[in-house]
Image (cartoon, coloured by chain):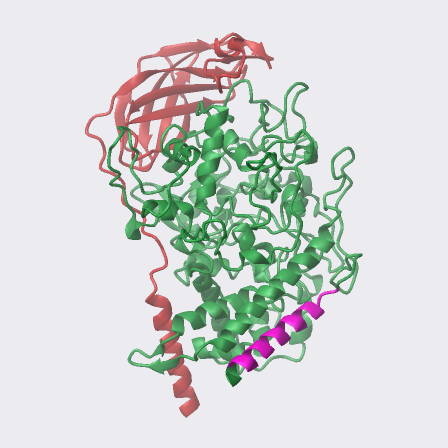
Amino acid sequence: MRRDTSTLVKAAFATVLGILSVPHTASAQLDQPFPAYNPYPPLPGSVPPTVLPPDLQSEVLRVRREVQTVFGRYFAEWQALTPPTLTGQPPTLFPTGYDAVRILGGLLNFDENMSPFQNQACSFCHMPYAGFSGPIPSVNLTMVAYPGTFRYRAAKRTAQRYTYSPYFPQLQFNQGQNLFFGGNFWDGRATGYKLQSADAEQAQHPPVDPLEMGFADTACIAFRLTSASYRQLFELVWGVDFDIRWPANTAEICGIPQGARRFAGSPTPIALSPTDRTKANNIYDHWGQSISFLEHTTDVSPFTSKFDAFLVGNYTMTADEMAGYNLFNGKGNCNSCHVDGRSTLLTPGQIDTGNTVGGQPIFTCFGYANEGLPLNPRLPLFYESRPDRFGFTPNPDGLRYRDLGFGNFLRSGPQSGTDPNAANWLQLAPETDGQFQVVTTRNVAMTPPQCPTTEAGQVDANGKPIPYFQKEFFHNGYIKSLKQLVHFYNTRDVGTFEFNVTSGHCPPGTTERVNCWPMKEVPQNLDMTTGMLGLTDQEENQIVAFLQTLADGFDPNNPTVSNYKNIDTFTGQCTITAPGVTASTQGNETLTPTWSLTQFPCATDICGVAPLPSMTIP
Amino acid sequence: MKRLLVKLAITAAAGGLLFSNPVVAQIPPPQKRAEHVEITKAPELESAHDDTAIIRWTTTNPRGDDEHYGIVRYGTDPEDLSQTAKNPIRLNRGHAETIFRVRMLDLKPQTTYYYKVTSVGSSGASDGVESAVNQFTTPAPGERIVNYRADSSLPPAYRTGTPQPR
């Protein structure tokens, strides 16, 4: 009892400390000690007429409070944990080793100290109630990419969902099929080649990405962990040696964001001895492994969707959900790439003998595809072409930037990672230009309980409007609802819908994302599995209904309340559908005209690097 | 010394915990290639603009590699189909038939093109099918040909192949 009381007090104290560190002002005070980086031009005539949404800072602070709430919960879990002890050979943490690593992963993932200004945890861009994707509706609606520790450097693409990411194998080129499989990130740049876990290596990128958490040196993670309140747990799990001789300027270096001129491009500005560098690297590896373990647990990837319950007979799909499921596997052809491991049933009464290892389909083929999304001119990256106060220019290519995705990674191009197998893979870049990871469809529809849908224009049984949670879809967030997503797959290639224009320039009499699809950002290697499916409007809606059955947290014994861990932490506002808006036109008010691509052609450090793209990128 | 041993033991335990956990899903091997593949719906023009066209055809499911390429060999002379367009599609293991669709780019307006189609697995193995030579004519600039409808709400004129304002 004394222990329990002590635990509660500690947890409450940790939570209060966290909350106190965030300014609670109506004016949404900037949470860094100097003015924001704001190279963003006005967008006259657009809504809003700026790249940054007006409520950005207040929303940043809101999410920070939620992050601290979850951190407090993991801290309390740790305090309540029966400490495991080393037992047996090989020595194993018994009997709570799994929980120890899971909780450690949670603490690391929600720890704001893991950024130069101690204002950004990994989870800032990945909150549970959004299926561990972007938590700010106005960002999802407009700027798409999330601001980093240095407000407002902004990232490159949508925040990809964590859920089921550990199930992706390390990036591999299957020579038999001449195809890539595995990896993490939209462009596959977390390969898993060293840790043999693409997901663990994914967790190692944002802390040193200048547009995200932004440490100047990976050793800053070890440095900050030396003073973490849960250091003891890290030592218990990993047995690491924190006895590192830190140079006197370490705290200063770890308080300056990546890319600062004073680092002169050095990837390791903290001057450690070789021995200490090895220790810091080991700690950084264990950072990634701990977070990956968390993402593999039921805290993140629990296989508790309605669909999972359906597979074992604990849920009966509605007529629309079932029709959507059959379309997903049949006319919609969705499961060609979002593999569900089930058979396609062509005859009534036929028994489904399909299966997957463990019986739990991941709804992805682990591959890459170019779906032909248009360039999204709302992405902040295009405008981050001026140096910030640290002398760092996020995107020197400016409006000439083009996102070639996987092909750009194979060339170790701008805004990507370094290809660790360039000696063999570089030659394959032209065949993969424009490709992005085929993500799992699981949790694509997950929302906070108080905003139970991603779709505008929905009403309940009494005709009352249902508030929605604005999400964003695909790598560049061009699509704003699941209805639009399915409609895109259905009609991308319809001759009357296809226009040789850029986003924001659809002809009069057409509606973008409804019956006008602008030109593709990368035209080559276009996947033609879909694009002309012939689905009716109702069939599109039925596929959306099926996608909604893939959200985790369904409890057959209490079907109206999600039991997904920490889904209750959303404290923001749902969106109320504006008059005349439907899921088909959701977000269209924020479309903004794209600049002339002819005037700003693809930059030479992207499109001019051998082996060259197979055709001209507009 | 004792502290060092404890650290080594914990490190070993942690390593064991990590590597005993099979976190990744297995990628199933490709299906066995179909012994015989045939075209069940002949290639035809799906749509065309003055500078692009989409050709589609259906075959029995060739199986084999998960990804296949539809290939169109074409030219303005039926005796010289020296140009090639190809696009990837992902096979559906559960479907009896496979629809191939290929997008041809950089065409000339109001020009008759001759073409034939084939398909290969991503490893390069041919499916062993090849169509007869067909033809189509691209529309004038600003017009388009649409042979497939998006949904039944479209006006009938959009389903007929009649050139439409672009």
Q: How many numbered marks are there?
A: 0
Q: Residue at x 50, y 59 (%)?
A: A565
Camera-side residue: A122 or A486? A486
Quadrant for residue B136, please give it.
Answer: top left
- Place of residue B121 in the rendered image (x, y in percent of width and height, measured from the top left): 31, 33
> Considering only vertical position in the picture, is A52 above or below A587?
below
Q: Residue at x 49, y 49 (%)?
A: A560
- Place of residue A434 in the rendered image (x, y in percent of width and height, measured from the top left): 50, 38
Camera-side residue: A361 or A600? A361
- The span shown in magenta is A4-23
Look at the image and tell me whether residue B106 can be seen: yes
> What is the magenta segment's predominant secondary structure?
helix
> Considering only vertical position in the picture, is B14 above or below A307?
below
The residue at the far left in this view is: B35
Camera-side residue: A86 or A519? A86
Q: Residue at x 53, y 33 (%)?
A: A483
> Considering only vertical position in the picture, is A354 above or below A533?
below
- Place of residue A150 in the rendered image (x, y in percent of width and height, measured from the top left): 70, 59
The residue at the far bottom in this view is: B1
Q: Which chain is red?
A: B
Residue A13 is covered by the magenta coloring: yes
Horizontal side of A328 relative to B33 (left or right) equals: right
- Place of residue A131 in the rendered image (x, y in percent of width and height, measured from the top left): 52, 51
Q: Which chain is green?
A: A
Q: Quadrant of the C terminus of chain A?
A: top right
Residue B130 is covered by the magenta coloring: no
> Considering only vertical position in the picture, is B71 above or below B93?
above
